[in-house]
Amino acid sequence: MSKIIAAAVILALGAPALASAAPARSDSDTVQITVKYADLNLTAPTGQAALHSRVTQAAAQICGGRPDTLLDVAGGQRFEACMAKTVGAALAKVPAPRMVAEAQAPQG
């Protein structure tokens, strides 16, 4: 029987009490990592890209990292689904989600 772990990335505008260096488990099995972005200018593409990078790195920690082998197709699919859900949920909490969504769109 597999255990489902809900994932969350907390975005903080400079609340040092909320900062954590490693994922913390609570009674509800939710893993949370605080991502600070008060130092970023979210109206600038570089600030948006930096926030996306920070959220993506935190999500990778929460989701357990990509499987070590390409043969683990199911594990890779679970990881990708977790990443999409976690990054999307975190960026949806940003006060300027349209700007951040533009930053994560593929550059062509």
Image (cartoon, rainbow, N blue to C red):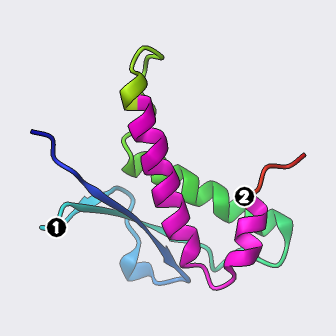
Measure the alpha-carbon separation of dots 2 and 1: 30 Å
Q: What range of the chain is rendered magenta?
A: 76-103
Q: Is residue 65 visible?
A: no
Where is residue 43 shown, x and y percent of the image? 82, 79
Where is residue 62 shown, x and y percent of the image? 38, 51
Q: Is residue 90 left or right of residue 105?
A: left
SS at badge 2: helix
Q: Is residue 95 visible?
A: yes
Q: What residue would you read off at disc 1?
A: 28
**In the image, is residue 81 part of the stretch drawn in magenta?**
yes
Q: Report the residue at 76% width, 56% height from top.
A: 105
**Residue 103 appears in which quarter of the rendering?**
bottom right
Q: Is residue 10 above or below residue 104?
A: below
Residue in front for this viewpoint, 104 or 51:
104
Dot placed on the residue nearer the N-terminal end, 2 or 1? 1
Identity of the amino acid at label 2?
Gln
- Mostly what secondary structure, the magenta segment? helix
Residue in front for this viewpoint, 20 or 62:
62
Residue in front for this viewpoint, 30 or 3:
3
Q: Is residue 91 left or right of residue 73?
A: right
**Residue 6 appears in which quarter of the rendering?**
bottom left
Identity of the amino acid at label 1?
Ser
Q: What residue would you read off at disc 2?
A: 104
Where is residue 20 shown, x and y percent of the image? 37, 66
